[in-house]
């Protein structure tokens, strides 16, 4: 393991963003199909709230623009109408991410108000495509909200377990 500091420096030089290398492990060649030992590096890095807020706002604008440009095509058949509802639920997810990051930057707590506001905006956007898109958008958004809540619970439990170690 005498090469570990050089390896950590090399990994840090690969990324333009500041990263912290959490673990570096050497595996024998029998476990991986390479001729020599392979290096596995786990990088602990998450996007800052400001950057995530900007990306979610840009994604929201692009998705909304494309949804409105292709609203005629999305309303043309049953399958495309369901697809229009799914795309509108992506608007919900992007707007919810934007509002959550904005509130995090301001130091306020995100609650159900952000969810309701993002859902109303997504349903209005879905209504511009087709009436059925409203229903499918609501159903897809409920599924996405469930998955986001489950994911945040897993991340929160991992961060709490790291804090309890001595």
Image (cartoon, rainbow, N blue to C red):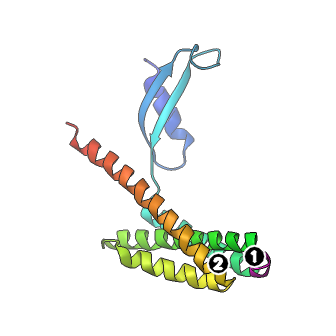
Does residue 72 belong to the magenta stretch? yes
Picture coordinates of residue 122, whole percent (x, y): 56, 79
- Secondary structure, mark 1, is helix
- Residue to which mark 1 is pinned: 74
Q: For the residues labelled 1 and 2, say whether their Cβ atoms are less than 8 Å apart.
A: yes
User: Would you call the spot at circle 2 few (<14 residues within 10 Å), some (14-19), or many (20 or more)?
Assistant: many
When the figure is inspected, residue 19 is found, relative to residue 89, above or below; the finding is above
- Going by the picture, which residue comes out furthest to the left? 166
Of labels 1 and 2, earlier in sequence is: 1
Coordinates of residue 54 in the picture (x, y in percent): 52, 69
Query: From the image, which quarter does the N terminus lie in?
Result: top left
Q: Which residue is mark 2?
A: 133
Residue drawn where x is 52% and y is 35% of the image: 11
Q: Work out whether residue 49 or residue 74 is closer to the camera in this orientation and state it.
A: 74
> Which residue is depicted at the point 64% across and 19% down?
33
Give the mark count: 2
**Magenta range:** 70-77
Q: Residue at x 74, y 69 (%)?
A: 79
Q: Is residue 10 above or below residue 46?
A: above
How far apart are the two marked residues, 1 and 2, measured between alpha carbons?
A: 9 Å
């Amino acid at each position: 393991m005498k090469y570990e500091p050089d390896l950590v420096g090399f990994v840090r030089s690969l990324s333009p963003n500041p990263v912290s290398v959490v673990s570096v492990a050497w595996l024998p060649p029998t476990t991986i199909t390479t001729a020599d030992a392979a290096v596995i590096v786990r990088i602990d890095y998450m996007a800052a709230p400001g950057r995530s807020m900007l990306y979610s706002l840009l994604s929201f604008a692009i998705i909304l623009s494309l949804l409105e440009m292709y609203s005629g095509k999305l309303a043309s058949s049953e399958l495309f109408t369901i697809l229009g509802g799914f795309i509108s639920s992506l608007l919900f997810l992007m707007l919810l991410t934007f509002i959550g990051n904005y509130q995090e930057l301001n130091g306020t707590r995100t609650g159900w108000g952000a969810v309701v506001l993002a859902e109303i905006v997504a349903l209005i956007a879905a209504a511009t495509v087709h009436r059925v898109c409203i229903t499918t958008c609501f159903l897809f958004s409920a599924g996405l909200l469930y998955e986001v809540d489950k994911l945040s619970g897993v991340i929160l439990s991992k961060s709490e377990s790291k804090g309890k170690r001595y």
